[in-house]
Amino acid sequence: MNDTPEFVADERLKPEPFIARLMKRPELGAIAGAVLVTLFFLATADSSMFTLAGVMNFMTPAAQLGILAIGAAMLMIGGEFDLSIGSMVAFAGLFFGVCSVTWGLPLIIAIPMTLVFAGMVGAINGVIVIRSGLPSFIVTLAFLFILRGLSLVGLKLATGGSTQLRGVRDAVEGDWLAPFFSGDAFQGLFASLASSGLIDSFKNGSPKVPGIPVEILWFLVIAALATYVLLRTPAGNWIFAAGGDSNAASNSGVPVARVKISLFVLTACCAALVAIITVMDAGSTDARRGFQKEFEAIIAAVIGGCLLTGGYGSAIGAFFGAIIFGMVVIGLTYTNFDQDWFQVFLGGMLLIAVLFNNAIRKRVTGER
Amino acid sequence: MSNDSTFHHGDAPKTAPIIQMNGIEKHFGNIIALAGVSFDVRPGECHCLLGDNGAGKSTFIKTMSGVHKPTKGTITFEGKPLSFDSPRDAMEAGIATVFQDLAMIPLMSVTRNFFMGREPTRGRGLLKRFDTQRANEITIEEMRKMGINLRGPDQAVGTLSGGERQTVAIARAVFFGAKVLILDEPTSALGVRQTSNVLATIDRVRKQGIGVVFISHNVRHALAVGDRFTVLNRGKTLGTAKRGEITPSELQDLMAGGQELAQLGGSLGGTV
């Protein structure tokens, strides 16, 4: 506010405390949650959890979920849901597997084809929702089953009866584009850090952590891009407006239908990216890939401050929501607790987040 | 003949109307919503359109703002015959309507609402971005011109009072170049103090040379700020009066169709 020198403060206003201003940021809950979870595991988990290797260990699943969660968060801010993203991971994984293994296409063709294909399915979702005016919840629930079923049928057709398509690793071996979508980045840097003793290394001198898994880099880049779009571009304003009140937005000249359909396409492309990365890592694809990821992604977005009613939320929040998720899933294995506490923990976090978000919304809108 | 008051400063200049509507009829199937309405607005005047519920006020302003096409009648805008195909056409021509729902989003900041759909940008190509600093400055400045000191440009619209929201909507229409500003019952849901703020805003806008169409069923609000008064009853105009030529009770009687309220008036002691 200091960049507007003409601004004269109202004398009836008390200066707002820093904490109160922070309280108004949608991502605050997620950041506070991440701090709490970190403190919890610092107290209870084996100290190896917070070594470099341990951090990479929980950041990898966090990143895979986070890419989905950021897409889901943008769509939720735009006022819609997509329950089909988990099935989309399996379906896009199948399409990618068929492209690279069955058809033997190089990655430079297979990856864009997979993204375009997934985007088209996302657009179908979006067009049905916009044209029919039905809740996206029900339309995408239908696609949850349709895409999961198609993945099973398609896998059997592609493999002659199996529900697993193998041989992706051999197919992409040596492709110049492969390092961008699989394995670890900055291996040279990590090797030199290990030899100079800055990071832990094995007895033979190779670093314990060979590099940063590429999905973490994608996760960071996508979070930064999404935040930039939401906060600093007209398109971001349109997303908030379309989700806040689509009628008011279109009366003010916002192309609501275009915004929402683009968001469905974006969410589907996020799912396809996760599919490409995980299929290349695993070397195979199967019909259960991405199972229940739609719920986990929406939970991460809600923990990140997105309102179920749309029009409010942040990509940074979803970023931290996904990290909390990864920490809890992996972190419990470092503790003496039964790992199955995970689901209890997750449900509890979700409930707290929703209550918290509701209170924040009332504060922001001045509701009493 | 001007009797200046708290909310009315100086008469409107005698110029040609910006928009002139003649013998407008609008039928919905077998229902005749408008049966011959004539109305015009000059720059710098506030022309009040009064009428009881169901008189056809809403249908008439929707015709004016391009939502409905008239079944019969002509619209002349700045001397040229005109027919709007959509609200967007009317908006681009300079006819801005502030409907009762205000087209505003409570969860978003004042700045984001102010520029919704018309964001200023800087940079080019992929670096084209929402110029938040300029948007914030303009919002603060425009709101201050309307007499509202915002806590900050990032204040959510939901925290504003009804009168302040109304003012944001008016300021937004004026900033984006409205020549005719149609206000649909802007004071109907407001308290006394907020009403006077909105009336003061209308006076301010009027003096900038914008033609204001003020729709109301409250005679006192209309008389406080209006230059001319047109009464609509059962889809027809009952006549137009100039400021100072009509008393509140005459206006009230016209709105009610003349009879029933005159009888009621006695028992209510002239309080309506």
Image: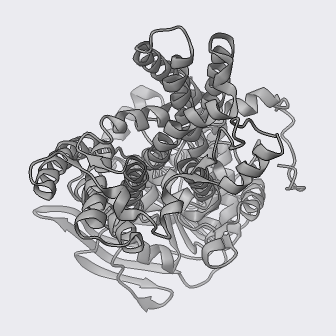
Q: How is the image coloured?
A: one colour
Rendered location of residue A113, percent (x, y): 33, 70
In front: A260, or B60? A260
Q: Report if residue A24 is visible in the image.
A: yes
Among the 4 quarters of the image, the one containing residue A104 = bottom left
Task: Left or right? Give the position of A216 relative to A90.
Answer: right
> Eyeballing the image, is A4 above or below A340?
below
> Eyeballing the image, is A37 above or below B248?
above
In front: A158, or B15? A158
Among the 4 quarters of the image, the one containing residue A266 = bottom left
> Eyeballing the image, is A216 above or below A261?
above
Who's the residue at 35% across and 74% down the image? B86
Task: Left or right? Give the position of A41 relative to B272.
Answer: right
Q: Which quarter of the rendered picture does the C terminus of chain A lie within?
A: top right
Task: Left or right? Give the position of B229 relative to A228.
Answer: left
Q: Report if residue A120 is visible in the image.
A: no
In front: B208, or B14? B208
> Eyeballing the image, is B114 above or below A360?
below
Task: Left or right? Give the position of A30 relative to A52.
Answer: left
Among the 4 quarters of the image, the one containing residue B202 = bottom right
